[in-house]
Image (spheres, coloured by chain):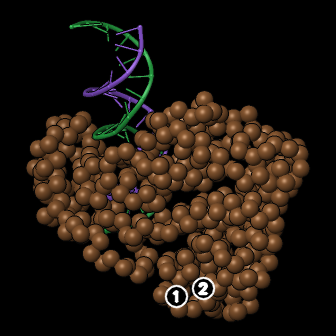
Chain colours: A brown, B green, C purple
Amino acid sequence: MVRSQCCDKVGLKKGPWTPEEDQKLLAYVEEHGHGSWRALPAKAGLQRCGKSCRLRWTNYLRPDIKRGKFSLQEEQTIIQLHALLGNRWSVIATHLPKRTDNEIKNYWNTHLKKRLDKMGIDPVTHKPKADSFGSGSGHSKGAAHLSHMAQWESARLEAEARLVRESKVIIPNPHPNRLGSTASAQVSDKSSAAPPARPQCLDVLKAWQGVVFSMLSAGSSDSLESPTSTLNFSENELAIPLIGVQKNSATTLAFATNNAPCNGGTTAVEFNSGNQFECFEKLNEAAQVKQNLDSSVALHDISPDASNHNAWFDSATNENAPMGIVEGLSEILVCTSQDHNAFFAGGNINDSCGGNLEENGNYWNSLLNLVDASPTGTSPVF
DNA sequence: AACTGACCCAACCGCAATGTC
DNA sequence: AGACATTGCGGTTGGGTCAGT
């Protein structure tokens, strides 16, 4: 394929945008929408390539962009999502309203990455640099469970991000005029429009931390809540839960049996107890999360058979659901690997299961507390 | 005041994915 | 089905700014 030469044409300007150029682009997009970015520069009277215009609009001129310092909450969100998603900035950006992927990426590279690095945490793996966790002969079952959880959350967050990007999500909007800007409303491009209401996916992060806290408080596996979003799989009331879910979970992701606003031939994924749905045209997309889970679990657990495309999976939280990830997590937390892991710096390091419970329980909290304690980069640990 | 190096971030580059004909 | 166009995305760069000497 021959690469587009749009930005290589002689006479096209590169480099920083002038206020005049910004004004031209802004005025044009507000009046006409951008339509084809390739054709836009000529129509708008700009000596720029379409790609440059798109970038400028997306990262700077869009009316729904928030600029300035990142809040503590935003920092936490970035760190947590990065731990789950890696460098998938566009996905992360969908969970940070009004922030662009470029801005988040820059902030990560210039601030957060260095901060974690100084703390002795590998900003790529979010593990301590000298970590032996999950490596060598000591690879524990608990580590595998944790890895599965991360993969599951990663897949789920990506699905939600896609949902946001594609504006497929059906969200009861309590603030129909929230966007306010007619300019943004006129923009036809999905990537340019103001994002819909913030997905509630971050509940999973809260839940993750919350359950850790509650577990530490309760000290009993009987009182476990889901550490992650819940996922129930039941078909025609014949529930074969893939992942056990305890009551009071904060976020649910389920394959619903009914009342989901999807057409036949699609598979609905319900988020947050029915507040949001995404319709997967491809079953394998809906099943993607499954594929990130333990291979020992059969795929048919979540796949409606061909004769029953609308066989939704029950979204109801099941108090009696068997243990799955919850079990895995509790196992990790209650009796995890024997590896001493300095990463869980907030915990009391000892060889007992209880000690490791506390260590693991402080996974996020330790990390975030350290970061929180040093918004200007001066952490107690360095 | 001048120089230097670190830092920051807007913008660019190029690959991949997706759309269109 | 395949070629081409367009868009999305993540990595990288380069120039402006600031702090330290």
Indicate left or right for A22 with A153 as reference: left
Residue assigned mark 1: A260
Q: Is residue A295 visible?
A: no
Residues flagged by tags 2 and 1 on a common chain: yes
Residue A256: give its label.
2
Contact between marks 2 and 1 (CB within 8 A): the answer is yes
Residue A38: give its label.
none
Question: The disc labelled 2 sits on which kind of residue?
Answer: Ala
Q: Secondary structure at mark 2?
A: loop
Question: The disc labelled 1 sits on which kind of residue?
Answer: Ala
Residue in the picture at 68% in, 42% down: A127
Give residue A36's position: percent from left, percent from top. Answer: 24, 60
Quarter occupied by the C terminus of chain A: top right
Indicate left or right for A312 with A169 as reference: right
Q: Is residue A332 above or below residue B1?
A: below
Q: How many marks?
A: 2
Quadrant of the image occupied by residue A40: bottom left
